[in-house]
Image (cartoon, rainbow, N blue to C red):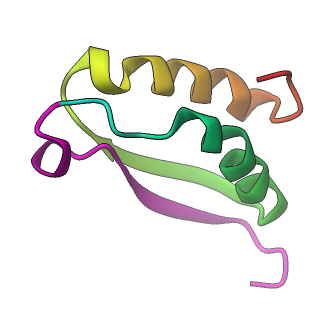
Amino acid sequence: MNGRPMGLYDYWNITQWSKGLPQFDIYLLPKKLKRWKTANVTSIQIEGTYGKGPIGHVMWIASRLLWDADQDF
């Protein structure tokens, strides 16, 4: 897209796939978010499980790293 801003839709730990259990590899998160920043992703929509246990901590960390992807994970 030649540096133009874009949005994306991603699936993180879908209930039907995970049966409500944690399956998202949290250690891939910093690399994924830095790649999005490099690609000029300015908006995201994430579909995840409804439980705060399997995905809540991932969403919390992602919300912090999305403000500054260079923070220490």
Left or right: residue 50 versus residue 43 is left
Instruction: Give the residues drawn in magenta, as a range.
Output: 1-20
Q: On the rendered image, what quadrant is the C terminus found in?
A: top right
Residue 56 higher or lower than 62, as above or below: above
Q: Quadrant of residue 36?
A: bottom right
3 in magenta: yes
Image coords of residue 60 (percent x, y): 52, 18
Left or right: residue 16 versus residue 35 is left
Q: Quadrant of residue 65?
A: top right
Residue at the location (81% across, 35% down)? 69
17 in magenta: yes
As drawn, the residue found furthest toward the bottom would be 1
Image coords of residue 19 (percent x, y): 11, 39
Q: Quadrant of residue 7?
A: bottom right
Instruction: Count numbered badges in the picture.
Output: 0
Q: On the rendered image, what quadrant is the N terminus found in?
A: bottom right
Residue at the location (77% across, 61% down)? 40
The residue closer to the viewer here, 3 or 12, is 12
Left or right: residue 43 versus residue 72 is left
Image coords of residue 49 (percent x, y): 22, 35
Image coords of residue 22 (percent x, y): 31, 30
Residue 4 higher or lower than 35, as above or below: below
Residue at the location (36% across, 27% down)? 55
